[in-house]
Image: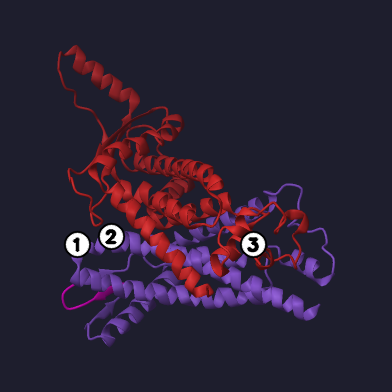
Chain colours: A red, B purple
Amino acid sequence: MRPVSRLIRHFALFCLVYGVLLSLVHTTSVQRRLVPVLVNTVRWVPAICLPAAYLHYEPLVSDRAVPSLTGDAGMIRVRFGNQEKVTEQLAAAKRQGMSTASLDLHQFDIKVEEFFLLPWLFFLSLTVVTPVPTRRKLPGILVGLGLLQAFSGLKLFLYLLYNFTLFPVGIYELSGLPFRITEGAFLHLKMGAGMIVASLVWGFLFFRATDWRSILHSIAMGGEGKGASKAGRGLGSDSKSTGRDLPGRGNR
Amino acid sequence: MYSRDRKKQTKGGRPGKSRLAPSSRWNPSLRYLGAFIALLGVFYLLYGTHVFEQALLVPFVTLQADVASFILNLFGAGTGVRDALLVGPSVSLNIAKGCDGLEATVLFLFAVGLMPFSKKSRAAGLLVGGLFLVLLNMIRIAGLYLAKAYWPEGFELLHIHGGFALFTLASVLLWAGWAGWAMEREKISQHETS
């Protein structure tokens, strides 16, 4: 098969996998299970880094019963404040015998699709179409999703720091360069950055010094799966990584 | 990053000890990744500055809007450009920061620039691939305008998933395609010299 045809084939396969995953995550029943998992696997980052903060995450899932490609995958409302003040306000309300308390909190919303799912879907689809053996894909997927969640946790931490400065509650107020860094993260670590991180994670997990040539050659020129699966058994291995040891030879 | 090693390997008939053959198989990957992240860090630092925005980004986005408008007007769309706004008779499309395609293009350029191939191969990749992605983004902008005008309910889908996921995929596949081409090209040139 010609290289362009191969690339188009990979593109089409990616679109197919991506479309299936996208329609799945747009299903309300999947969202109801997935969104809390997404939140719970990143909330530890700000919880550790911002111990004086009161943080509350509220998943907002649409009631759509039918999966829709054009719909969204819900939101997460992040409420934040000063833990000490919130504790005082709750205690005061309890002393006064009130069933509800007025809390000094601020909030911002996170779009699940843009914040979490876009890098997930991209990474998963890219992994599926990558010509490496399944036994290597499965642990790669687990580690990759873990790394993407760590990145989302870091992003959430930076978003919170920015918002703590924007809406002061007496803690974590930044100025100067640290504030500009959080501002930059809030403004620029969006979908494009998520895609770049997903691509880097994919490259990091599936391209090794022993076989990156054979994998790339398989994607572009053919011999799908063979080159990559033989990696470490001679083709392009470290000790033989010479200028002449190019992957095409291993596939013939 | 590895081009000098490559020369070391290919000039002599026998494989020399190179940085591509370290004791740990992860070292070159980590070095590549480290260089990549460092370059991305520099890019994002610049991307957020006012100087970069005014000197490079605004002219670049305006150019993209101009070409997208030109493409649309070939089909009688009747669009015009006001700054980064693509204005038509019924709808207008704002080419916001992040929709400029720069991140995916930079991803491709860094990926090509850091690969251990000859300077000629990399220069060809940077030039042809870079131009291809810029042109593709212009077509994407024109397509998004049409979606907003004729399929508004599908606009967000195309904007997010077509605009970011597929455009980044195009960048990744273009990189893989270029790498395959560069491997074949260098294999042929080695056969010719030996």
Amino acid at circle 1: Glu
Report whether residue B51 is seen. Answer: no
> What chain does mark 3 sit on?
A
Give the distance between the C-alpha atoms of the residues marked 1 and 2, in whole angstroms. 8 Å
Frontmost of labels 3 and 2 is 3
* Residue drawn 59% across the image and 77% down it: B124
Frontmost of labels 1 and 3 is 3
Helix, strand or loop under label 2 = helix
Residue A233 in the image: state x and y as whole percent. 70, 52
| Mark 3 crowd level (few <14, some 14–19, many ≥20, 10 Å Cα) | many
Residue A151 in the image: state x and y as whole percent. 46, 44
Asked whether, in this view, residue A32 is left or right of residue B128, the answer is left
Amino acid at circle 3: Arg
Residue A159 in the image: state x and y as whole percent. 38, 44
Give the distance between the C-alpha atoms of the residues marked 1 and 3, in whole angstroms. 43 Å
Name the mark on residue B153. 1
Check chain identity for marks 3 and 2: say if they share one.
no
Which range is magenta? B84-91
Residue sitting nearer the eye, B61 or A201 = A201
Amino acid at circle 2: Leu
Report whether residue B168 is seen. Answer: yes
Residue bearing mark 3: A213
